[in-house]
Amino acid sequence: MNVVRAAVVGTGHLGRLHAKKYALIENVDLIAVCDLNRKTGTAVARACDTAFLKDHCELIGKIDAVTIATDTSTHFELSRFFLENGIHVLVEKPMTTNSTEGRILTALAEKNDLRLQVGHVERFNPALISAREKLGTVQFIECHRLAPFKKRGADVDVVLDLMIHDLDVILSLILGRPCSISAVGISVVTETVDIANARIEFDTGAIANVTASRVSTSTQRKFRVFHEGQYLSIDFGEGEIQLVSQSDTTDEDQQTLKEQRWSLKKGDALLAETQAFIKAIRTHSPCQVSGHDGVIALELAENIITDMQKRVF
């Protein structure tokens, strides 16, 4: 099997993790990490036993694949540069700051027959993968993604920073198009929205109620899915699943609901995401989270932000 030569651009928190995952995958050679900050870049390079480069242009001709883990505002130009030079791209979410840029990247990847994967890592969460097997036609989704404030990610508002994780999962579960949105957002510690809620109605009749906050005192990543005769709760953080469904009992005096609970090993969703990217390259197959997926999540996020701006406090 041919060795895939890879690199990571951006050596902050996520970039460091991405570099470590490449180092764990068989027949992948982490050629270099790249960052404008020599101090952090050199430290990550040393930890991953690879080279450090300050200029990403030096990677051309040396790699087959790259992960972009820089600030969101730089995703478009960096991804376009590598796609134009024949390099497969895994770009962290959100893939760009707007859907227009996302569509340009998707078209460029298709034109050059390259893999473009977006880093919506929850798709690779073992809890979600297990829960999918139990789902029927989804009618209602309620999710909460809460986190303490961190400067990392604060270059965009909370919809693009955190909520977009859940928007991507919702779009992968509900067959239909959003047709109505009602959203509200509040700025607490930054100049952009830090806590937001959106109610999304789909043309299938399904509804999703989504809350995201980056100014909470604790972390929560919970996802609840309802459809006829069944309720499923997923705790992304703890890897716990609760399934409540109709009981088979016909005794009117007995409880008519039955509950099942199971826990999964947390696993390594980021490693699974990276492995899926490498597999798509090797097998010349579509990415599990494609550029198109990234675009439709961005489009929904943009529509939420537009509605939210009508009533930002």
Image: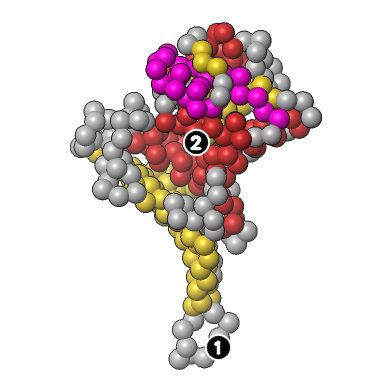
Query: Which picture quadrant has residue 192?
Result: top left
Magenta range is 27-48
Residue 68: x and y, percent? 51, 23
Q: Is mark 2 on a helix, strand or loop?
A: helix
Q: Does the magenta stretch include residue 304?
A: no
Residue 136 to residue 176: above or below: below
Residue 56: x and y, percent? 52, 12
Residue 218 to residue 195: above or below: below
The type of residue carrying mark 2 is: Ala
Which residue is painted at 52% across and 52% down in the image? 266
Query: Which picture quadrant has residue 281?
Result: top right
Q: Is residue 214 left or right of residue 67?
A: left
- Residue 223 appears in view: no
- Residue 20 disc label: none
Q: Mark 1 = which residue?
A: 250
- Residue 267 appears in view: yes
Q: Mark 2 = which residue?
A: 297
Q: Which of 150 and 105 is in front in this view?
A: 150
Q: Which residue lies furthest to the right in this view?
A: 1
Which residue is painted at 24% across and 28% down in the image? 191
Q: Quadrant of the C terminus?
A: top left
Q: Does the magenta stretch include residue 38?
A: yes
Q: Nearer the viewer, residue 271 or 246?
A: 271
Residue 60: x and y, percent? 62, 10
Which residue is painted at 73% across and 33% down in the image? 285
Residue 293: x and y, percent? 57, 35
First in residue order: circle 2 vs circle 1 = 1
Residue 207 to residue 79: above or below: below
